[in-house]
Amino acid sequence: MLKYDTSLFYTHLQSQETAREYLQQCYKNLNDIDAEAKSYENCNAFMYYLDHGKQFFSAGVKSPELMQPILLFYGATHLLKACILTKRPNYPESTSILAHGVSSRKRKKKQYTFIHDEVKIQHNGLFSYAAQHVYNIKNFPFEKINMEDLFSLIPEMNDLFLLSGEEKLVAIGNVDSTTLHFPLTLLDTFHLTEKAFVKRVSNHLPPITTTKVSSLMIQLQLTNPIQQTTGPFFTELEHGKIYFPKNRENFLAIPEVLVHYLLLYNLSMVSRYETEWWGELLALKAERDYPFIKQFLAITAWKMPILLGNELIALAHE
């Protein structure tokens, strides 16, 4: 697949003509859809999703930390809806899918910490709808998940965990490479034999041509590179490194976009409805939560538009 600059691609889609042509390309292989008519019908909504999403992200970057979670969450939802519209020309088909699709604890416990808070996946709403129609995930690998496990899946957060002596991800290769190297120590944390481990990861990879095992590594040679990384593989964008969970409990087949969505959802809810806790966190910086939240907000502000832009580019070439 050709590589495009996501920022340039967003700019490309800012006219009715180019947005319509893009949607028509996306719709032409869908069954029972008049691609030309639907692309005309949806191009304005598509452009507004993109424009509003980008503006929310831009405002989020410039705003105080107090408001960042809300603005970045709205930015993410708008860009995600643009991705959905490329797959589902009749979106939204009902009001039930307009909800967030996630819930959090309504009342926080006395010794509340964000990193140990949980969110629960709902059957209806934007989250499950996007998971199914953008990422082809019908059954999620969890019903609820805590924030530390979600932070653990973002490669750019790994160094912060390392400072606390908690490595969550290991680098196993590079984008566009057909060779992956898994440390042999993963067999202990996953409680698997070499054969069982290779079988488990192979379900999420292009076909494997050769497997070599040394005293330190399991080397896999693939027929072609991983084009679009999705869990349990996650990409660090600056250097193009592919990361893999160090621990069995973090082996989750979930796209990073949805990881960011869940974190942003819960952060936006906390900042809106747990005013005292949120205010004290930002003012006193007493909890371990603060550096993790601060680092995540800085990462998601630039990474989420790129991840969703990559989705739009990939959808045009399916």
Image: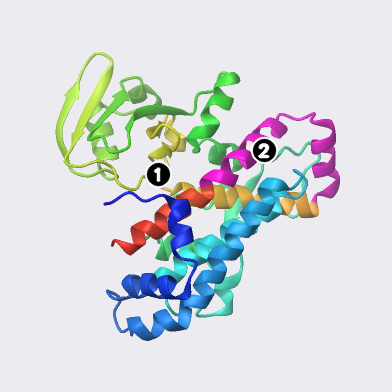
Q: Is residue 91 visible?
A: no
**Near-viewer residue (215 or 263):** 263
The crowding category of the residue bearing disc 2, from other C-alpha atoms within 10 Å (few below 14, some 14 to 19, many at least 20), is some
Give 14 or 136, whichever is nearer the viewer.
14
The residue beneath circle 1 is 231
Query: How many marks are shown on the rendered structure?
Result: 2
Left or right, 274 with reference to 302: right
313 with respect to 277 (left or right): left
Q: Which residue is mark 2?
A: 293
Residue at image location 64% in from the left, 42% down from the top:
297
- Under circle 1, the secondary element is loop
Task: Say which mark, if any, is on residue 265.
Answer: none
Q: Residue at x 76, y 39 (%)?
A: 112
Q: CA distance from mark 1 to mark 2?
A: 22 Å
Give the residues in magenta.
274-303
Instruction: Give whichever of discs 1 and 2 has the lower sequence position.
Output: 1
- Of the residues shown, which amino acid type is indicated by label 1? Gly
Does the segment drawn in magenta span residue 261? Answer: no
Task: State the image coordinates of residue 244 (x, y, percent, origin top left).
Answer: 39, 33
- Where is residue 307 drawn, in percent x and y? 46, 49
Side of 177 where 292 appears, left or right: right
Residue 58 appears left or right of 4:
right
